[in-house]
Image (cartoon, rainbow, N blue to C red):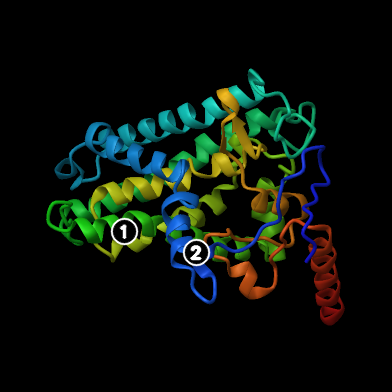
Amino acid sequence: MASNPYNATGTYQPDKTIGPPQLYAWPPRPLGALRYLFYDLLFPWGYFFIGLAFVTWYYLTPPLATMAVFEPGWIALLWLRNAALLTLVVGGLHWWLYVHRGQHKEYKFDDKWPATGNPKFLWGHQVRDNMFWSIASGVTFWTAYEAVTYWIYANGYVSNPAFVDHPAYLGLMLIAVFFWSTLHFYFVHRFMHYQPVYKVVHELHHRNINTIPWTGISMHPLEHSIYFSVFLLWWFVPVHPVVIVLTGLFQGIGPAPSHSGFDFIKLRGGFKISTGDWYHQLHHQYFNFNYGNTTTPFDRLFGSWHDGSSDSLRAQKERKRMQRRKAA
């Protein structure tokens, strides 16, 4: 493929095309794999969510014993907690990038600002539309799955291993969250692009071609019901509740940076941190490839990987034309 990246929607051009992580290099590259696992994968957002998960479990969550019986009180507290965390993180990103416009359009993938007066969005307003679906539906399904998971653990149906007794296992499970989430996402998302499902359900999310932080979990309730089923693994695999919290945070708030619409947040002193995902941004531009994430590169396996170059785009369009001819 060509080495030059190409972004058709704005003046900003990423500085390189997208390849699979060195974790999957052959022959193996141990140092590259370690760098990916502990830096590329986790810095800065993975470490942020892991830290937030510990704080959330130990200071912002009712005791596990109180969750052995379904009661409106503790479930409502979980919902309010999740809504508040979502609003603080996603709202903070949105405020800096789109309200305050702290770096104007520097590193912005699309030159346009969020849509207003567009009838395809509720109230004709992209931001309000995305906030509504994220909070009213997204937080509700997130909380429902999380509450059932705690109930299972509180009743002893699955064991609750302590960090002190199993530090290596539980540390591994914290990292496993990122791989399990992206693996789950690929197959759920690929199903969402099955045309009958897409037209009724997933089209709501794809109204956002020019994405914003609130786009992350702005989805149809039916999609939320499947998307947050990522919790089901912990109904069978024993983990510490911090891992359960991390699953919700990464699944609920994690998509905000990847949908922020900006590749980086600019900091003082010439520093910057990644706050975008060009790989997924390309999916919102073109719809028919990059269904997953680079962390678990199933697109590479199934031929739907677009690396961001103009040559790759032409190859993917030709692949889709061939598929349509065979289906005709």
Does residue 247 appear in this view? yes
Residue wearing tag 1:
173
Q: Residue at x 55, y 66 (%)?
A: 187
Task: Residue at 46%, 27% (x, y): give it.
Answer: 88
Q: Position of residue 270 (x, y in %)?
A: 60, 28
Residue 244, horizontal then vertical, whole percent: 32, 50
Q: Is 220 positioned to the left or the right of 304 in the image?
A: left
State which quadrant residue 316 falls in.
Answer: bottom right
Residue farthest toward the bottom in the current orientation of the protein: 326
Residue 264 vertical position relative to residue 158 in the rendered view, above or below: above
Spatial CA distance of label 1 from label 2 is 15 Å
Residue shown at the point (48%, 30%) measured from the top left: 89
Image quarter in which the N terminus is found:
bottom right
Q: How many marks?
A: 2
Picture coordinates of residue 163, whole percent (x, y): 18, 52
Name the residue carrying label 2.
183
Looking at the picture, how far across and down is residue 140, in whole percent? 44, 41
Labels 1, 2: front one: 1
SS at circle 1: helix
Can residue 229 be seen? no
- Label 2: state its secondary structure: helix
Which of 134/258 is in front? 258
The amino acid marked with disc number 1 is Met
Q: Is residue 10 left or right of residue 207?
A: right
Residue type (three-letter) at the residue carrying disc 2: Leu
**Pointers 1 and 2 in contact (CB under 8 A)?**
no
| Residue shown at the point (23%, 59%) measured from the top left | 168
| First along the sequence among labels 1 and 2 | 1
Instruction: Answer few, some or many: residues within 10 Å of disc 1's Cα (few below 14, many 20 plus, some between 14 and 19).
Output: many
Q: Specify the quadrant of the image occupied by residue 179.
A: bottom left
Locate the C terminus by quadrant: bottom right
